[in-house]
Image (cartoon, grey):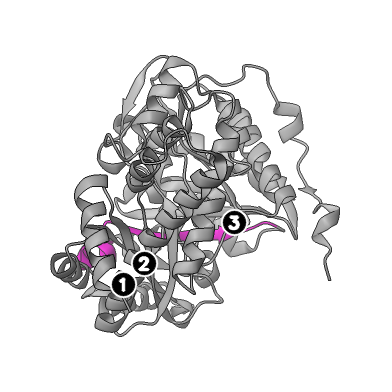
Amino acid sequence: MISRYEVVETNKMIQEANLDVRTITMGISLLDCVDSDSKKLNDKIYDKITKNSQNLVKVGQDISKELGVPIVNKRISVTPISLIGGNVTDFVKIAETLDKAASEVGVNFIGGYSALVQKGFTKADKNLLRSIPEALSKTERVCSSVNVGSTRNGINMDAVKQMGELIKEMAFLTKDNNSMACAKFVVFCNAVEDNPFMAGAFHGVGEADMVINVGVSGPGVVKRALETVRGADFETLCETVKRTAFKITRVGQLVAQEASKRLGVPFGIIDLSLAPTPAVGDSIAEIFNEMGLEQAGAPGTTAALAILNDNVKKGGVMASSYVGGLSGAFIPVSEDHGMIEAAQCGALSLEKLEAMTCVCSVGLDMIAVAGDVSAETISGIIADEMAIGMVNNKTTAVRIIPVIGKEVGDRVEFGGLLGYAPIMPVNRYGCDAFIKRGGRIPAPIHSFKN
């Protein structure tokens, strides 16, 4: 039960510290849509999505209005499409069907144009992967992800090599729009089945037929709370983050319960991820500043992020029995004005970001690089990040955008929540021979836990 005091606290966080519910995401299983006939398959997909999510946007708007809680996005995630495509060869048509359904119900993104290839490829996987550049360049709302590694299975380096090539291709196909297709694509190690955040959301096969997952944000709330304990010791700092995360999660719990009840769909999880926006006062980097760092990227940044991530999780699990997804702190460059400033002044490098991903929720997110960076170098960056996830038994990801026509020192505008980003320098030494080896990197020894 949400108390009157919590309502007052929530109103204050909304009005003064940019608190919002970042997304209500409806997960929909498409396993019962499988059909050997391509037209029937697409018709079933469209009908199931539109029938079951037709009230999602309205319910989100009604809850937002009645509770006074901003709900920024309403989204859909579906079963990884490679699992239901079977022998269908025209996967782009499925992407267009997803896009049409998302447009019909009014959501801003639909995730799940995805494949899970950490140990190898099926025929459907291969067909879907080949289609990703065309599918993302032809659609507006479709998001795609590929899981290429896991702690249990190791890393599929054939897939990693292909990811670099696909990213370069989709960058070229959307070169007139700042290579935007790449912003809708993410490569994972240890992908989770209940992530409500794009571009990596998909509805896992272990999920119910339909669920409601809610993603809550609030870096501005955490920063405001830390201002009250400026200069205090680390125990006080950690307790403050924990208490604040508890309050933020309770807001998500309330919204999730209401959405679940009104839509008649089971409640899945709350994802408490401190996801920043380009707005001043809604930045992970500003939290680092408040902790005592001159800039994000300064010595101590990885430790500060570890403190933040751990205590966000500790506070969240006390507020809801069903905290899931990624839950922690995101460090996207383009979506956080403080991170953008740090990258522009040279305080934050790609290598420092990689070190930070050892302790954050996901990985290298919304990184813009020069358009002439090679596919092999991109694959090398992905391989490094997948290795961090595999060895540390955590989810890691890469969303990198080689912007055609841009060079280091330039800036690229993505717009909306995606913000803008400086083109970051990349290590100029090659890794071509390493990437071309192919095969699979075996799982680490500590993966054998039975």
Give the residue displayed 55% in from the left and 37% down from the top: 304
Residue 427 x, y percent position in the rendering? 61, 19
Q: Quadrant of the C terminus?
A: bottom right
Tell me the number on the disc at residue 254: 1
Closer to the camera: disc 3 or disc 2?
Answer: 2
CA distance for labels 3 and 2: 42 Å
Question: Magenta stretch containing residue 108, yes or no?
Answer: yes
**Label 3 residue SS:** helix
Pointer 2 residue: 250
Residue 431 x, y percent position in the rendering? 70, 26
Q: Is residue 57 above or below residue 430?
A: below
Pointer 3 residue: 126
Give the residue displayed 54% in from the left and 23% down from the top: 298
Give the residue displayed 59% in from the left and 28% down from the top: 352
Residue 49 x, y percent position in the rendering? 32, 74
Q: What amino acid is found at the position of numbered circle 3 in the picture?
A: Lys
**Magenta residues, start to end:** 100-118
Question: Magenta stretch containing residue 111, yes or no?
Answer: yes
> Would you say 302 lies left or right of 96 here?
right
Tell me the number on the disc at residue 136: none
Residue 271 x, y percent position in the rendering? 44, 61
Query: Can residue 114 be seen by looking at this rendering?
Result: no
Q: What amino acid is found at the position of numbered circle 1 in the picture?
A: Leu
CA distance for labels 2 and 1: 6 Å
Give the residue displayed 48% in from the left and 73% down from the top: 322
> Would you say 422 lies left or right of 14 here?
right
